[in-house]
Image (cartoon, rainbow, N blue to C red):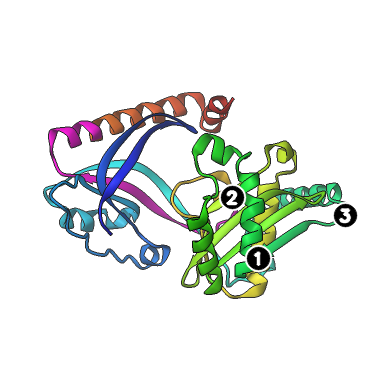
Amino acid sequence: MPASEIALPLRIGARTVWTLRRRLVRRGLTLEDALAGRLRALPPLGADDDGYLVTSLPAALVPRLADQAKGFRAFVRQRYARNFARLDLGFDEYLAGFSSKSRSTLRRKAKKLAERSGGSLDLRCYRTPDEIERFHSDARALSARTYQERLLDAGLPSGPEATAEMREKARRDQLRAWLLFVDGRPISYLYAPAEGDTLIYAYLGYDPNHAEYSPGTVLQLEAMRQLMAEGRFRLFDFTEGEGQHKRQFATGGIDCVDLLLVRPTAANLLAGWALAAFDGAVALAKRAVGGAGFAKRLRR
């Protein structure tokens, strides 16, 4: 993969306060590579390239990467558990892995939303090229209203290139997508493309006007039920970064880091030190205020 200009945000919770840009080759480990402990060789850089951004690197593989990247300066962008769920379990076995309190909470949320929907959940799954066209049209309109798009710039992609890619994945049976409806209108969506037999948690969003019903949580639970009944895919990859939602639905996790590896030029080192200092200050503030409370205050 060639290098490109990659944005390196200085972020406090959901808010990006500044963005640094470097010309980097992005290399992300797949879930299967991470589980197997496989570290593929870094590609050569061009003369004008600044370095690499390596994501979802298992912490145990950092020494091996250091051997590959001699002469580069490493900066840790984040540490997290890369969560995943096995889909080859029966749903009852999967649900038994939750605490009794969590199971009760999930059932209560699903029941509450079902009652609001007239007695049953209106969840629709999309997988064929024609179905994915309908999904994209409805989900894009919803995505524009979501917290994920407004604050994190992480909404469902728009435009003909995005729909063409989705149609091609659907043609090869390499995706699943869902919409959850209330009163005939979508209130939550989940889009999960596949790599082999692993589905990837790519885009999830919900209508903030229905937040009291936890639609994203209800949709995720019902999607897992369908996937385990279907038996087409083996793993569900919640990807890099942590969050309560990912931890709740995971059956396992791998301790990972995201590493910025740069050539030791003055500009690259200044960028790396600025990112490290900012991230460290945010982490200290978060611990002082108290984790989730810090993020909630920033969203107000």
- Spatial CA distance of label 2 from label 3 is 24 Å
Which image quarter is the C terminus in? Answer: top right
Start-end of magenta stretch: 247-271
Residue ID for mark 1: 131
Q: Earlier in the sequence, mark 2 or mark 3?
A: 3
Residue 101 is situated, as x and y percent measured from the top left of the image, at 70, 49
Residue kind at label 2, given as amino acid type: Leu
Residue 13 is situated, as x and y percent measured from the top left of the image, at 48, 32
**Residue 14 vertical placement versus 159 (above, below):** above
Residue 267 is situated, as x and y percent measured from the top left of the image, at 17, 33
SS of the residue at dot 2? Answer: strand
Looking at this view, name the residue that lies furthest to the front: 160
> How busy is the neighbourhood of tag 2: few (under 14 within 10 Å), some, or many (20 plus)?
many
SS of the residue at dot 3? Answer: loop
Q: Earlier in the sequence, mark 1 or mark 2?
A: 1
Left-right relation of 167 to 178: left
- Spatial CA distance of label 1 from label 3 is 25 Å
Residue ID for mark 3: 119
> How busy is the neighbourhood of tag 3: few (under 14 within 10 Å), some, or many (20 plus)?
few
Residue kind at label 1, given as amino acid type: Glu
**Residue 93 vertical placement versus 120 (above, below):** below
Name the residue at 53% across, 63% down.
Answer: 166
Residue ID for mark 2: 204
Left-right relation of 265 to 75: left
Can you tell which mark lies on residue 192? Answer: none
